[in-house]
Image (cartoon, grey):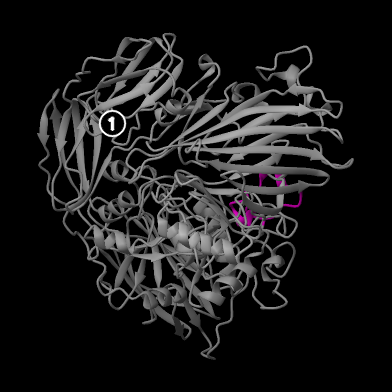
């Protein structure tokens, strides 16, 4: 910490009772006066004004204020940011204390304070659930500069309803950093990067998912701008009884794609082992509880490492042990240190020169070396008590593809003639999560993304073999393809024609209104890579819809030289996770954009949403950003809950699918009944103060991601959307990728949004927003369209009882469109065979006010499947409305039988 900061902190100490500062050790609340000095940064940093900050001069930690909601609670007081001070490296999400392993049974914080005690910075959180009281003391000391100590004391103040047989300390690492389970006390209990799914299976998987390890290591992504790793260790769990007896309690680690945690029990197991969980242990749990007068004491520590490998943490455990060091000729290699029987010990990334080192107890080990596109190598190494320097590990030169320069495109490599598809994003960890059916590994990425700028990758390693290479730049361009043969060690210069524009879309701009990257809590995809993937697909407008925070891509777009190729819009995805009395089934997921980022606020100013109805959040957003659009995201997963359901379907409800439950109704939306009837009528209940209703959003996704992921999702969302339109709820239909990483296609599906100036350089956010609200857009996975009804365009109104529906369907040569479907009032009235670049003129007549929508359907050919696996060519328009009696008012037709 700088002297200026110390002087500033001293002033704060004199004037604010909530601040305590001594030397480099500090503990204080963030205020307008100190926010510039104290606010942490990095991909996942969300702390802001009102939150609490402690530091030992090396690492800094931020805790949310009481009224700042958590990922699993409407209350704050939890650890949200952790990293090296001033280093912009935070990838920490948040922690939560749970009873019984139930995410709904949170111990909610009701009071916090900070202090400096004997040169130790302390944050203390006081939480309760019923008669159970938990005091958590977080502390940072200069004596151990990279360790955050966590001491927890759980007591029962009186007899109560909530049992405390199981306690889970939970870290919300949802689909983010890869995890490595490690036992610091007995390394042969470590199981490394191989995990077992527990979040979905629950207690049925406890026997295989609970690992007898005391440490969970979180590895940041290798290509992050600033690397980091975390090591979370449960040091001890003890029962201190009223009579003075102390019992060491069983504890286990849990880790999968969706979360991580330590589970510990209120008593030891009788007659069976405390080092494993099976039926004999689980049948004892219902009889366990914390008695009045007894104290449950849990000690944890979180270590922070400055590299993105396991060794950044294990070196701290083994700091007094000898060092194994050396150099590998391929700096992209990854080294795995294992015992001779294959038990994982550590994982090391070499520096840019290939130098590496790792601490471990003296002994014989297996050292595996993995590098992109090369076969693994293995050697037995002897780590002497005084350390060992290995001879240079010489790896073969991998074959490399020298990539084209100066053109934006995506290159898709498909193995042919027995060659396996390449994976250009292999982390080389072997990370996997097993469930009852299979072992899941990271999805492969056989594509290379180029933005046509200097920072594009120059080459990629690839295994020898035969490949078909496709060059694509989205649905408006031709594709190029070539078959290549790559031999061992070859430096192959790829000669492929850059995709050329095949069709144009004058008056429209290509927009994806739902895109994620590293700032979202559920992934760690670098922001620079996100921009490269978007430009490669000829996406033009990207709405940055990061979960529960906001990120401004504009400076990065300028820095990378992409300002003439794309533009970004700041938004957020309000992500309901907490079930509450006010909203028993959450708000689902909602995008709001464009928003003004508030850099010093909690979550960068993203609206709070837990425990609130949609109508309250809409009011909050509009008070700050009056023109912001609210878009209901992926409100169904399938057709399973579509239509009328009279029985209890609570076990089938997915909280992220809002129309499965409608938040407060706890019952699916029923398109066969009027919106004024139960349960649909909760959507039109007006807030007594603002008058806003839950349904008063501007848009809803009809398409979200690839069709094969949820095969009936489009049908389900289309059904609900049409029923809304039939009843006069003029909500706009959109189509978005919801892409989080390279494994999820970005800019497809996409929206073609009507703008008078359809250039990126002339982009007007105001006009863009107005066009969406007006419904002047269509969604597509390939076909482009132009459409008018008697001269009226999308979102507009035609007056009269007859009109000609005119337009044109256009596709690139490799995209199929064979059927044009016309819907009046949500009901199909005709289908027409069409060919590429088909013009159409269809006479329509109307006896009453109506609305007209068209759909275009095609088949996925071989090239389309290779470029967009899991997708099918499809496009839908938003409505053109019909005022048949020319009275100047549009009267909705009412519910219709949909076909």
499 w.r.t. 438: above or below: below
Dot 1 alpha-carbon crowd within 10 angstroms: few under 14, some 14 to 19, many 20 or more = many
Prevailing SS of the magenta stretch = loop
The location of residue 612, given as percent across then percent down, is 67, 63
The location of residue 566, given as percent across then percent down, is 28, 63
875 w.r.t. 773: above or below: above
517 w.r.t. 152: above or below: below
Left or right: 392, with 13 as reference point: left
Q: Nearer the viewer, residue 544 or 352?
A: 352
> Was residue 646 drawn as part of the magenta stretch in this picture?
yes
Q: Quadrant of residue 295?
A: top right
Left or right: 103, with 185 as reference point: right
| Residue at horizontal 68 percent and vertical 38 percent from the top | 152
Look at the image and give the residue range highlighted in magenta.
642-661
Left or right: 626, with 875 as reference point: right
Label 1, on which residue? 421
> Was residue 695 drawn as part of the magenta stretch in this picture?
no
Residue 102 shows in this picture: no
Q: Quadrant of residue 378?
A: top left
| Residue at horizontal 16 percent and vertical 56 percent from the top | 500
């Amino acid at each position: 910490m700088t002297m200026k900061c110390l002087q500033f902190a001293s002033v704060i100490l004199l004037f604010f009772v909530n601040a305590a500062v001594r030397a480099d050790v500090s503990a204080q609340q963030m205020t307008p006066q100190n926010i510039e000095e104290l606010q942490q940064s990095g991909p996942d940093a969300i702390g802001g004004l009102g939150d609490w900050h402690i530091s030992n001069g090396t690492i800094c930690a931020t805790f949310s204020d009481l009224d700042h909601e958590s990922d699993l609670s409407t209350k704050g007081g939890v650890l949200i940011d952790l990293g090296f001070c001033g280093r912009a490296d935070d990838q920490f999400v948040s922690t939560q204390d749970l009873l019984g392993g139930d995410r709904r049974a949170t111990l909610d914080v009701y009071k916090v304070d900070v202090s400096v005690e004997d040169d130790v910075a302390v944050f203390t959180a006081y939480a309760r659930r019923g008669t159970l009281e938990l005091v958590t003391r977080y502390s940072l000391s200069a004596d151990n500069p990279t360790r955050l100590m966590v001491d927890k004391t759980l007591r029962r103040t009186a007899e109560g309803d909530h049992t405390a047989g199981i306690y889970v300390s939970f870290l919300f690492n949802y689909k983010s950093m890869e995890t490595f389970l490690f036992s610091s006390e007995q390394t042969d209990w470590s199981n490394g990067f191989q995990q077992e799914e527990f979040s979905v299976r629950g207690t049925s998987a406890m026997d295989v998912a609970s690992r007898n390890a005391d440490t969970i290591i979180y590895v940041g992504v290798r290509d992050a701008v600033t690397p980091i790793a975390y090591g979370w260790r449960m040091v001890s769990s003890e029962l201190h009884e009223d009579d003075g007896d102390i019992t060491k309690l069983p504890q286990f680690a849990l880790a999968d794609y969706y979360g991580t945690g330590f589970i510990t029990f209120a008593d030891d197991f009788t007659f069976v082992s405390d080092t494993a969980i099976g039926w004999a242990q689980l049948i004892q749990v219902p009889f366990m509880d914390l008695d009045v007068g007894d104290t449950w004491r849990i000690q944890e520590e979180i270590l922070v490492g400055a590299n993105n490998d396991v060794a950044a943490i294990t070196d701290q455990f083994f700091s007094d042990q000898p060092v194994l060091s050396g150099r590998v000729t391929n700096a992209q290699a990854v080294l795995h240190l294992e015992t001779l029987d294959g038990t994982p010990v550590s994982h090391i990334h070499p520096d840019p020169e290939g130098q590496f080192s790792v601490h471990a107890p003296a002994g014989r080990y297996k050292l595996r070396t993995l590098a992109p596109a090369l076969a693994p190598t293995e050697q037995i190494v002897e780590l002497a008590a005084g350390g060992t320097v290995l001879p240079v590990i010489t790896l073969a030169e991998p074959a490399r593809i020298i990539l084209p320069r100066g053109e934006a495109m995506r290159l898709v490599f498909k193995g042919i003639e027995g060659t396996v598809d390449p994976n250009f994003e292999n982390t080389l960890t072997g990370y996997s999560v097993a469930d009852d059916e299979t072992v899941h590994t990271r999805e492969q990425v056989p594509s290379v993304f180029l933005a046509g700028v200097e920072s594009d990758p120059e080459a990629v390693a690839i295994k020898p073999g035969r490949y078909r290479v496709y060059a694509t730049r989205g649905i408006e361009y031709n594709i190029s393809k070539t078959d290549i043969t790559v031999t061992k060690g070859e430096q192959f210069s790829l000669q492929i024609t850059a995709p050329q524009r095949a069709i144009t879309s004058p008056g429209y701009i290509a927009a994806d209104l739902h895109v994620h990257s590293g700032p979202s809590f559920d992934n760690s995809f670098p922001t620079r890579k996100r921009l490269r993937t978007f430009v490669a697909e000829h996406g033009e407008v990207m709405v940055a819809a990061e979960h529960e925070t906001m990120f401004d891509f504009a400076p990065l777009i300028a820095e990378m030289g992409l300002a003439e190729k794309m533009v970004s819009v700041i938004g957020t995805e309000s992500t309901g996770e907490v079930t509450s009395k006010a909203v028993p089934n959450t708000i689902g997921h909602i995008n709001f954009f464009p928003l003004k980022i508030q850099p010093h606020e909690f979550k960068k100013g993203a609206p709070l949403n837990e425990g609130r109805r949609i109508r309250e959040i809409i009011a909050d957003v509009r008070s700050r950003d009056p023109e912001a659009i609210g878009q209901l995201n992926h409100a169904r997963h399938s057709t399973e809950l579509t239509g009328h359901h009279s029985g209890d379907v609570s076990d089938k409800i997915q909280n992220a699918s809002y129309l499965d439950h409608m938040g407060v109704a706890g019952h699916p939306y029923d398109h066969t009944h009027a919106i004024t009837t139960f349960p649909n009528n909760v959507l039109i209940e007006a807030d007594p103060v603002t008058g806003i209703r839950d349904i008063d959003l501007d848009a809803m996704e009809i398409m979200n991601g690839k069709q094969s992921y949820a095969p009936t999702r489009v049908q389900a969302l289309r059904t609900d959307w049409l029923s809304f339109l039939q009843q006069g709820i003029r909500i706009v239909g959109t189509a978005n990728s919801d892409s989080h990483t390279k494994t999820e296609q970005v800019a497809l599906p996409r929206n073609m949004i009507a703008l008078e100036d359809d250039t990126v350089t002339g982009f007007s956010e105001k006009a863009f927003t107005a066009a969406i609200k007006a419904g002047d857009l269509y969604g597509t996975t390939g076909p482009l369209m132009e459409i008018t009804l008697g001269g009226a365009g999308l979102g507009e109104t035609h007056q009269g009882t007859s009109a000609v529906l005119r337009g044109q369907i256009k596709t690139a040569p490799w995209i199929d469109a064979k059927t044009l479907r016309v819907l009046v009032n949500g009901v199909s009235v005709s289908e027409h065979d069409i060919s590429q670049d088909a013009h159409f003129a269809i006479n329509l007549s109307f006896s009453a006010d109506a609305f007209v929508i068209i759909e275009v359907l095609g088949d996925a050919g071989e090239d389309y499947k290779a470029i967009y696996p899991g997708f099918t060519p499809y496009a839908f328009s938003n409505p053109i409305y019909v005022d048949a009696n020319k009275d100047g008012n549009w009267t909705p037709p009412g519910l219709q039988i949909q076909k």
